[in-house]
């Protein structure tokens, strides 16, 4: 069994196990009553999308540039 690092990855792995390791079958899963059904793609469908302001985007861009500069050879 692979090293599972998050609950969503564990759910995805269970769905793949249930569908004989076939990702296409996970997509076509007919068991909509399963408690894992909404999470079968390894994402939380109930999580709100994060909206960033222009200022927040600029701060993140600057932090990324600093991080890349530190890791550059």
Image (cartoon, rainbow, N blue to C red):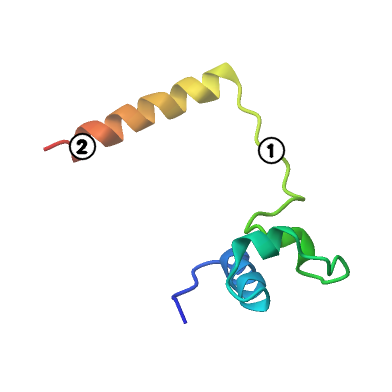
Residue 49: give x, y in percent of width and height. 69, 38
Instruction: Identify the residue at horizontal 53%, vertical 25% (top origin).
Output: 56
20 or 52: nearer the eye? 20
Spot the residue most to the top: 54
Question: Which quarter shows the C terminus?
Answer: top left
26 or 14: nearer the eye? 26
24 or 65: nearer the eye? 24
User: Mark 2 or mark 1, which has the lower sequence index?
Assistant: 1
Instruction: Identify the residue at horizontal 62%, vertical 59% (top origin).
Output: 42
| Residue designated by label 1 | 49
Residue 40 shows in this picture: no
Specify few, some or many for label 1: CA neighbours under 10 Å numbering under 14, 14-19, or 20 or more: few
Q: Is residue 46 above or below residue 53?
A: below
Q: Are marks 2 and 1 in contact (CB under 8 Å)?
A: no
Residue 30 shows in this picture: yes
Query: Does residue 56 appear left or right of residue 41 in this picture?
Result: left
Spot the residue most to the bottom: 1
Residue 33: give x, y in percent of width and height. 88, 69
Mark whose residue sits in front, 2 or 1? 1
Spot the residue most to the right: 33
Label count reads: 2
Residue 14: give x, y in percent of width and height. 63, 75
Q: Quadrant of residue 61?
A: top left
| Residue designated by label 2 | 70
Spot the residue most to the left: 73
**Real-space CA distance between mark 2 and mark 1, rounded to the nearest whole angstrom:** 30 Å
Specify few, some or many for label 2: CA neighbours under 10 Å numbering under 14, 14-19, or 20 or more: few
6 or 1: nearer the eye? 1
Residue 20: give x, y in percent of width and height. 62, 76
């Amino acid at each position: 069994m692979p090293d599972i690092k998050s609950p969503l990855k564990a759910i995805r792995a269970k769905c793949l196990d249930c569908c004989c390791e076939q990702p296409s079958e996970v997509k076509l899963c007919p068991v909509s009553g399963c408690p894992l059904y909404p999470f079968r793609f390894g994402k939380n469908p109930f999580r709100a999308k994060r909206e960033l302001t222009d200022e927040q985007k600029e701060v993140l861009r600057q932090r990324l540039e600093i991080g890349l500069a530190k890791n550059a050879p």
